[in-house]
Amino acid sequence: MGCRSKDAEREQGFTLTEMMAVLVVISILALIAIASYFGASKRAAEAACRENQRVIEQAIPVYMTLHNDQKPATIDDLEPYVRTWANVTRCPADRTVRLVLDPVTLKVSCPLHP
């Protein structure tokens, strides 16, 4: 019935070059998305760590009020005054890193986020 021309046969699919170009573009977009995700994840963990530090620092005035203005010697002295103690004393970026209280300045810090 219908005779196909050679031009019609060539236009039916993608060439190898076109497929490779599409794969390269998709790969680049995927790399950008992955890099953005890890950057956002790192910033979120740092923000959560700073919030944990703030929560612990808010327990210091309560401790001092109940202990005749005596400063806490270690961060563990504040445990009864923080409801989620096990969660807030560890850095969200690395759960093996513990927050530290400076007994002189009464500032809580993280070794990963100075």
Image: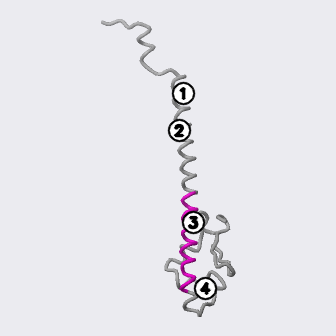
Residue at the disc numbered 1: 21
Depth check: give the residue in front, 96 or 9.
96
Which residue is found at the position 61% from the left and 83% from the top? 76
Dot 4 crowding, Cα within 10 Å, few <14, some 14–19, many 20+? few
Image quadrant holding the N terminus, namely: top left
Please tell me whether residue 12 is drawn above or below residue 93 in the rendered image: above
Residue at the disc numbered 2: 29
Of circles 3 and 1, which is in front?
3
Please tell me which of labels 3 and 1 falls first in the chain.
1
How far apart marks 3 and 2 lie (CA) works out to 28 Å
Q: Three-letter amino acid code at disc 3?
A: Pro
Q: Report the predominant secondary structure element of the magenta stretch.
A: helix
Q: Which residues are magenta?
A: 43-62
Residue at the disc numbered 4: 77
Please tell me which of labels 1 and 4 falls first in the chain.
1
Which residue is found at the position 53% from the left and 85% from the top? 62
At mark 4, the secondary structure is helix
Image quadrant holding the C terminus, namely: bottom right
The answer to whether the residue labelled 2 contacts the one labelled 1, judged by CB atoms less than 8 Å apart, is no
Q: Position of residue 34 (x, y in %)?
A: 55, 46
Please tell me whether residue 7 is drawn above or below residue 96 in the rendered image: above
Q: Is residue 72 magenta?
A: no
Q: Is residue 44 magenta?
A: yes
Dot 1 crowding, Cα within 10 Å, few <14, some 14–19, many 20+? few
Please tell me which of labels 3 and 2 falls first in the chain.
2
Tag on residue 95? none
Q: Position of residue 99 (x, y in %)?
A: 63, 73
Q: Position of residue 93 (x, y in %)?
A: 59, 63
Residue at the disc numbered 3: 92
